[in-house]
Image (cartoon, helix red, strand yellow):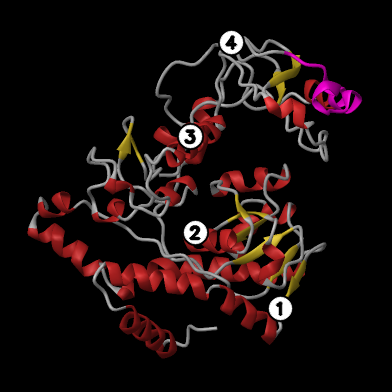
Amino acid sequence: MRTRLLLLLPIAILAIGLIAHGYQSPSKSRAAEYFPPRDNWERRKPADVGMDHAKLDAAVEFMKSHETAAPARDFSDQEIIFGKLLGSIPTERAATNGVVVRHGYIVAEFGDTERPDPTYSVAKSMLSTAAGIALGRGLIPSLDDPVAHVIKDGGYDSPHNRAITWRNHLQQESEWEGEMWGKNANFLGVEEFGNGQMKPREIHDPGTYHGRKKVVLPEDIKGMKIRPAQSTIGQMVTMLGGTNVQASAPEARDVLERGVADAIFFPWGSMFLFGLDKVTKYHIDAPLYSTVFTYSMNKAKYDAMAPAQKKVIDDHCTTEWAVKLSSPWHDFEAAGRDKMKAAAGHEVYALTPDQLKAWKASVAPLQKAWAEAVKKAGGDPDALYKDFQATIAKYQAGF
């Protein structure tokens, strides 16, 4: 499930890695490993832990002078952004505050750090840390094991959810189906999800790479932070040495603008729809991926329908209607390609045959993994892939 937290982070947590870059702790300091007790962390001067005092002060002053404009100080914008709240929130948030920790020691502190405040996506860091501990202790046998092997609370009983792995969850690509805290995972409805609501999804025109860095070969992905379009792209990014940055489409511009992500895989027309043309420069002119969307109905609801109602549903569950529904979206996305080519400050470039060949070769392990998964499920991957290729050729939809 794409977790969307209802509260935001006003406490500024400073990343100090560059300030301490290159510092190696003396062996004596590692002789007796220090682990801070709860609510009583020791303090050290920056120089004592290998940090530059002046640069640390500058970082703190920068944070103090750059308070966020969102959320509103009185939280009046929360239901507009996120929809119906699940519980109470403070009447007002604190000003920017933070604690800088190095090797377990507090080296700087500013603002009211004792103030209870919402924490938004800090939950991602907390959950990933807890998952790491669980993996280390053997509570999670393997990241690629289905969650259903361990969790027996009913949330992984459906055919789709049974296949979800721990890795899918940690990379926020599981598409978990169901409800949590009274909200459905489909993110439909402005009342429930505010500006974060989603619309029923269809098939969109193939998308591609868009970023601040020019990428022509798979190895160029190494070290980059990329917002993937779907789980297969996410696996590819990881395999090529990149880092996946998960964000919804409305959040994508923000993560690119703030440097949280360097690039994104996205369809052409929607680049303009979500303002992503303002934060990218380089665009590969090749259909690198596509995404399949479905309309799903609970079987019990379908079974409860009158025969005439079922006939309406059945008559429209056809390839013909899928084309009717998706064609306008396809045309919109495809038109974005020429629009990007005409836009000032953008470079839309084609891949050479050798470069395209390298991309195809780079994803061969993903196809192998898919084949193994199909075999485990009792299918014939070779027959399925052959049929898929024949269909692509029939409709001249290949590249």
Q: Label 4 is placed on what type of residue?
A: Asp
Q: Label 3 is placed on what type of residue?
A: Leu
- Label 3 crowd (10 A; few <14 / some 14-19 / many >=20): few
Q: Label 2 is placed on what type of residue?
A: Gln
Cα–Cα span, label 4 and label 2: 41 Å
Question: Bounds of the magenta span?
Answer: 43-58
The mark lying in front, picked from 4 and 1, is 4
Q: Quadrant of residue 223?
A: bottom right
Marks 4 & 2, CB-CB < 8 Å contact:
no
Answer whether residue 13 is visible to the viewer in this image: no
Q: Please tell me whether residue 136 belongs to the stretch shown in magenta.
A: no
Residue 335 position in % (x across, y down): 61, 70
Task: Read off the residue under disc 3.
Answer: 127
The disc, 4 or 2, on the residue closer to the chain's N-terminal end is 4
Identify which residue is drawn at 67% across, 86% down.
353
- Label 4 crowd (10 A; few <14 / some 14-19 / many >=20): few
> Is residue 111 found left or right of 345 in the rendered image?
left
Task: Read off the residue under disc 2.
Answer: 230
Cα–Cα span, label 1 and label 2: 23 Å
Answer whether residue 293 is visible to the viewer in this image: yes
Identify which residue is drawn at 76% across, 66% down.
214
Task: Read off the residue under disc 1.
Answer: 350
